[in-house]
Image: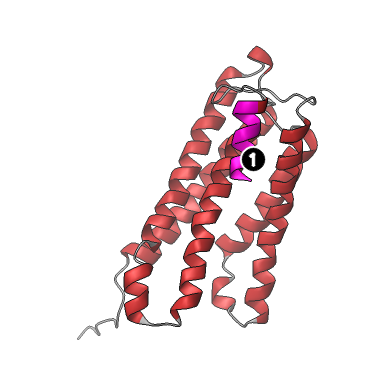
Amino acid sequence: MCLTAIYQAFVVNSYSFWGQGYSAKEAGMGRIIYVFYMSKWYEFFDTFVMVLKGNLHQVSFLHVYHHLSISFIWWVIAYHAPGGDAWYSCALNSFIHVCMYSYYLLASLSGGDPKFRKKYLWWGKYMTMMQMTQFASMMAQASYMMYLGDRKGGYPLGLAKLLFYYMITLLYLFGSFFVKRWTTPKGPKKKSA
């Protein structure tokens, strides 16, 4: 999806980096945006797998909020403006998911072996940082889309605002997760006298 969105954006439709309005003539881009939207439901299926496996600790507010809300947002995009500046979020998020699922694959192969985990899964903290960088970048893009407004036949202003405020919520939730997971000391708590 990442490579196809990039190909559609720059080779087929000659986009500049940001600032593209939606055009119904871009059928190839519309198809990849629809496939990307459908992938959000496939990703939400992870929740059911977690429940069936009894991994309820993984079914956090962040997980459920993100997967439900992103599915709805991409439905709105796929229905109203499946092209233009939507290419950026599609390509960037697809790339992040390739990295994330590579991490999960390695984690599943580790079998809980601490040596394997130390050697191959040291970059978990950086994966979360990549996700937060992605959200900040998408917020910057949404700001640019709002700045352009309807000039140059820009991307729909309502969708730009939706993405901007949604990215704020994701930065907050993923930032909270990052602090809890990667900066809070682990181990037994000391009893006070």
Question: Quadrant of the rendered structure where residue 39 is?
Answer: bottom right
Pick out the residue farthest to the left: 193
The boundaries of the magenta stretch are 1-11
Name which residue type carries label 1. Thr
Q: Residue at x 55, y 72 (%)?
A: 58
114 or 59, nearer to the observer: 114
- Secondary structure predominantly adopted by residues drawn in magenta: helix
Q: Is residue 35 visible from the viewing direction of this image?
A: yes
Q: Is residue 113 above or below residue 183?
A: below
> Label 1, on which residue?
4
Q: Residue at x 71, y 41 (%)?
A: 33
Judged left or right of residue 44, residue 177 is left
9 or 162, nearer to the observer: 9
* Magenta region includes residue 7: yes
Q: Secondary structure at mark 1?
A: helix
Q: Residue at x 59, y 35 (%)?
A: 6
Q: Residue at x 54, y 76 (%)?
A: 57
**How far across and down, in percent of the image, does residue 1 sit?**
64, 46
